[in-house]
Amino acid sequence: MRWSKLFIPTLREAPADAEAASHNLLLRGGFMRQLYAGHYSMLPLGMRVHEKIADIVRAEVDHIGAQEFQLPTMHPAALWQQSGRLEIMGDEMFRLADRKGTELVLGVTEEEVFATLALELNSYKQLPQIWYQIHTKFRDEPRPKSGLLRVREFAMKDSYSFDLDEAGLDASFDLHHGAYVRIFDRLSLPAVPVEASSGAMGGSGSVEFMVPSDAGEDDVVRCTGCGYAANIERATSRLADIEDDAGPDSPERFATPDVRTIVALEEMQGGAPADRQIKTMVMVVDGEVTLALVRGDHQLNVQKLLDATGAIEARPALPEETVESLGANPGSLGAVGVALRIVADHTLAGRTSMTTGANEDDWHYRGVSVERDIAVTEWTDLREVSAGEPCPNCDRPLEIVRCIEAGHIFKLGRKYAEALGAAVLDPNGKTQTPIMGSYGIGIGRAMAAIVETHHDERGIAWPVAVAPYEAVITIASMKDQAGVDAAELMYSQLRSAGIDVVLDDRDARAGVKFADAELVGIPYRITVGKALADGEVEVTVRATRETERVPVGDVVERVVGVITAQR
RNA sequence: CGGGAUGUGGCGCAGUUUGGCAGCGCGCUGCGUUCGGGACGCAGAGGUCGGGGGUUCAAAUCCCCCCAUCCCGACCA
């Protein structure tokens, strides 16, 4: 293509709203434009990158035997009713009605629709199946942000596996794990597979592929020594045991005037260090007032509470709900003698001589033996790991890294197949519900993640595999007829060799063309200009900005060589 | 949903405090000069000042209501 004919509306100044590097540069480089919050138009340049990413994803899932479909994005609400997810997804789903009044939803994912198609599977001999599509998904995000990183309408590759049993699911899952590693490698994304929560989707064996980046929204706990890595919603650490004295035979009530915080209780005469306190969080879990207990120096992770209880929603109780259920205000709360549902963190198990609120303002208990004095309903992992704590595997310090979630694979189980009535006969002639896995990669998010990890102050530096054009031939001056002729010849030779090449034939100053090529991020630039007097052109590598003079006669072969090696 | 900020030409902004011709830079069009790192001169085009209501002789500016966008938090397969 000739740059003079392309629609590449680059901006010299960044739109004021773009904070994340990928947001800023994709706008400035003329890859996309916002239509409104969370909805972006892909311009020709953006479309090319998007398609290249999708093609890589497609090739790798095809390689593991997946079959491509294209499903509707608009679904009857009744289908989501049937799986029970209409309520679970709640406000996250866009809903509409047709002229007849039939309720419709815009697809958030496609488990239901694929499971419906799976009704036509009837024998174990047809399994396993891996089905996928690359298509638009809709989510009514409360807060779209950071350009393509968090949007309300986006293309995603979602695949689903159907197997007869767990062993089959493990195999399908492992196939995807391998495919994802290859995909992110080809995309030049340094994605780390981490243990994750499977969230509202249900299921187990959840692995997220995380790309370290400040623009991300997830925290990953990673060991500096061994390979341990987990989402903070899931991560654990090994903590030193604490020696308790036995304490009194029963809790001792004592006055704590104006003490409302862990710190205040630590500092108070007769108080207790934070790790000898029980922090009592009053939460409303799916409508039920529930106490979540963690050690005084620990933080509650709400997702862990959700995972432990299997609940859909958990929120801190309102002040009036707290007073109503416990009779005191935050700062004096405790679980001693309380009959509510009580979920406690493992670190409290067996602890004695602890201090906690007495459910009366300005009073606390000391000498609390957790298992003797508190009717814990469930013991589980609730606390959030902090940086520097010892790795659960090797004891070396953990670090917390901000990441973009680029992919997520997990074992779904039989929930959807069962809800929709999918079944096959096994070798014994018995009816079995197939077991599903679910695997997603957001295409636009991957595109943004690549920019986040491949840019500098001048613009984007695309990896060859996803670059909108692999090479640009920059004609320094359109008045230089010899230069124009040489560039035209190279252009047609590179095109014949199958290179995605763009000829910058605009009647603009060289500086403008250089700046645009660097902003847009084309990996190789061939400059035809003053070196032509010596029978040479310059080849500049965008990522390193290294320039080399190459004889005109050699440049095509040279460039074809380096580019094909990197595809 | 809570907190903060912002809405003025395609983009970036000033003007709002103290009401009085709607401006600047970039970009865009034409002509000329220039031509390897976002040139220069001259001449132009382009704006319901987010929307509605109110106050006033007069509103981008003051008052009321609404909307939108961005940031932080909550939330988020």
Image (spheres, coloured by chain):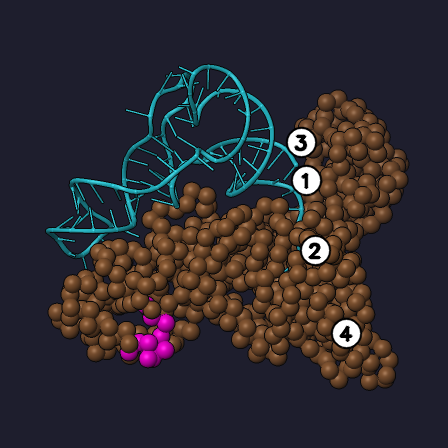
Chain colours: A brown, B cyan
Decide whether residue A399 is among the magenta residues. no
Residue at image coords 33%, 76%: A495
Q: Please give the label number shown on residue A297.
A: 1
Distance from the alpha carbon under mark 4 to that under mark 3: 59 Å
Q: Residue A99 carries which label?
A: 2
Residue A501 included in the magenta stretch of the image: yes
Q: Mark 4 points at which residue?
A: A119
Secondary-structure class at tag 4: helix
Q: Regarding mark 1 in the picture, which secondary structure is present there?
A: loop
Q: Marks 1 and 2, Cα distance to the nearest angstrom?
A: 57 Å
Q: Mark 3 points at which residue?
A: A263
Judge if badges 1 and 2 mark residues of a common chain.
yes
Q: How far apart are marks 2 and 4 (CA)?
A: 29 Å
Q: What stretch of residues is rendered in magenta?
A: A493-502
Q: In which quarter of the image is the N terminus of chain A?
A: bottom left
Q: Which of marks 2 and 4 is nearer the N terminus?
A: 2
Q: Which chain carries label 1?
A: A
Q: What residue type is labelled 4?
A: Leu
**Cβ atoms under marks 1 and 4 closer than 8 Å:** no
Q: What element carries label 2?
A: loop
Query: Label 3 amino acid?
Result: Val
